Amino acid sequence: MDRWLTIAGVGETGPQALSEPVKTALGNASLIVAAPRFHAALATMLGKAGHVIGFPSPLADLYAQLEAHKGQKIVVLATGDPLWYGIGASLIDRFGADACLIIPNVSGLQMAAARMGWPMASCKILTIHGRAIDQILPSCQRRARLLVIAENGQSVPQVAQLLTEQGYGDAEITALAHLGADDEASFHASAADWQHQVPDFHILAISCPDRPAHHAGFALADADIENDGKLTKADSRASAVAKLRPFAGAVMWDIGAGSGAVAIEFMRLAPQSRAYAIDKEITQINMARRNAKKFGVSNLQHIHAELPSALDGLPTPDAVFIGGGLSTSAIDACLSALRDEGVLVAHAVTLESEALLLAAWQKYGGKLARLSVHHADPVGGFHGWRPLMPVTQWHFIKTAKAQGTSDGKR
């Protein structure tokens, strides 16, 4: 197997500390890609510098440069472990695993955990390099330990401000800069008290407080979700999301999304998932955007359009929730688009929409249920049960058979 592209990890100690296999690959390379801070050391090691280039901006331009030398021996020096939030994954996607030889180094994340005395297995690993910082919020759970790859020197004050605004001002933050280098440094303070100036190249270690966190867990509190009253309440939302079977990398459609609560809950349980919140009302779309930002869901796409035309061109869904905009055409379009073994859950609270679900259940099968929730409320000096509006729920799993012979068909 001719692996012409070597992606090797390098630490802050520089190329001179690399292993002999990497040094040999560098000596045989016709092109070397490395950060500018390593160019002088590479020139000294190799006795030549004309074939050493830096990473371009935008980084996507690197692909064309590598394509121009495809088949020749190329070495890309990446920070730490190239496959741990590094460039290795992108290069494998582009050129294939058969073309790429990965030689990892000790990751800065491992070094950060070692400096903190945190077992790696106890840490949640995140990156905000080129990504929205809001996405750290779902991980801010009780006693959580977060290791976060930073974007630049402004990352820490931005994270500290976000945590403080969201009620985590007492979270402890340690910024670990230039790990493994002679100028390694650390800075520590609570989020609310953060005032340090930190170098661009660093990792954040965040220790969350030992108390309940409103962003944590499943079935977010109704009061925490911005809504106009038309909200899939926590109890029925929990039932719907459980039946939608979230999994990593899933594609989900939230039809008649309203506040976006169901899509947000789904994505918080399914890392790297993609969801599409579709609603014909722009006020609802804007509300869903605000809720997604509040709860740290950065990969929720918002579509302002009518059904079923709004579904044209969307990625094939693994899960579909219909909370509003129920119609026979919308149900049929969703079922047609749904992946085999995919799941559809639909809710109805009015008699008219319930009739549509009854007809769909009779036509396609699945499971039809009535969700009834009562809460104990004061009645004078005593207490009594106060009911929420009952919800009719249709749960359907699409099999590889023709529609109409799927799960639950009577």
Image (cartoon, helix red, strand yellow):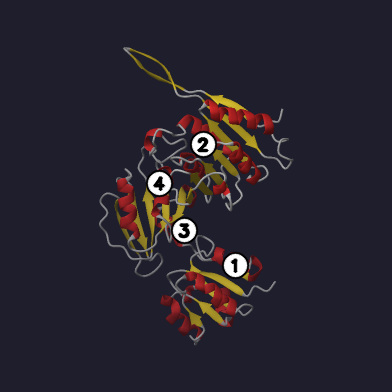
Looking at the rendered image, the quarter that the N terminus falls into is bottom right
Report the side of 15 relative to 368 (left or right): left
Q: Earlier in the sequence, mark 1 or mark 2?
A: 1
Mark earlier in primary sequence (2, 3): 3
Looking at the image, is mark 4 or mark 1 earlier in the sequence? Answer: 1
Residue placed under numbered mark 1 in the picture: 94
Position of residue 276 measured from the top left corner of the image (x, y, whole percent): 51, 48
Q: State which mark lies toward you, 1 or 2.
A: 2
Alpha-carbon span between mark 4 and mark 3: 40 Å
User: Along the line of sight, which residue is nearer the eye, 162 or 208?
Assistant: 162
> Of circles 4 and 3, which is in front?
4
Q: Nearer the viewer, mark 1 or mark 3?
A: 1
Sooner in the amino-acid sequence: mark 1 or mark 3:
1
| Residue 36, percent from left and from top | 42, 77
Q: Decide: marks 1, 2 in contact (CB < 8 A)? A: no
Q: What's under tag 1, amino acid-wise?
A: Arg
Label 2 to label 3: alpha-carbon separation: 44 Å
Distance from the alpha carbon under mark 4 to that under mark 1? 36 Å
Q: Which mark is residue 323?
A: 2
